[in-house]
Image (tube, grey):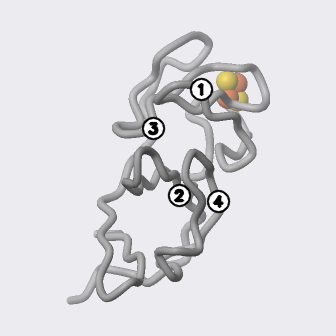
Amino acid sequence: MNTWFDVGAADGFDEGAVAPVVAGGQSLALFKLDGELFALRDKCSHGNARLSDGYIEDNCVECPLHQGLIEIRSGAPKSAPVTEPVRSFPVRVVAGRVEIDMA
Ligand code: FES
């Protein structure tokens, strides 16, 4: 079964930025860091905030609600009040299209 979902053209995402996307019916935050793409569930593990509304600092996203930090590449918690990881999803680029594995 195909679990990779197309979320748009690879050149449609800006370096050092985050964009909300939907794959397989789930809301995700898609980040571009040093030319690489990373996808996290678009919800902070601490509360009801969207990471696609957050600020990117170094390799982390700062939650817009209580300013907890989450590592973009892994979804790991980096600072309080975030203590639980955010699920991350594999991303690939095929023929100029971004695909996310929702398996
Ligand atoms: Fe994200 Fe509280 S909701 S740090």
Residue type of the residue flagged with mark 3? Ile
Q: Are marks 4 and 2 in contact (CB under 8 Å)?
A: yes
Residue type of the residue flagged with mark 2? Leu
Residue 82: name its quadrant. top right
Q: Are marks 1 and 3 in contact (CB under 8 Å)?
A: no
Q: Nearer the viewer, residue 50 or 60?
A: 60
Q: Which residue is mark 4?
A: 19
Q: Earlier in the sequence, mark 3 or mark 2?
A: 2
Q: Nearer the viewer, residue 87 or 35?
A: 35
Q: Residue furthest left?
A: 1
Q: Is residue 57 above or below residue 24?
A: above
| Element under disc 4 | strand
Query: Residue at the location (41% across, 76% down)?
Result: 98
Q: Which residue is mark 2?
A: 30
Q: In the rendering, at what x and y percent does residue 18 appear?
A: 62, 52
- Disc 1 to disc 3, how far (Cα)? 10 Å
Q: Are marks 3 and 2 in contact (CB under 8 Å)?
A: no
Where, quadrant-wise, is the C terminus in this rendering? Answer: bottom left
In front: label 1 or label 3:
1
Query: Residue at the location (31% across, 88% down)?
Result: 95
Residue 80: name its quadrant. top right
Q: In the rendering, at what x and y percent does residue 56 appear?
A: 62, 34
Residue 53: name its quadrant. top right
Find out if the beta carbon at label 2 lies less than 8 Å from the nearest ligand 1 atom. Answer: no
Q: Which residue is mark 3?
A: 72
> Label 2: how many residues lie within 10 Å, few (<14), some (14-19) or many (20+)?
many
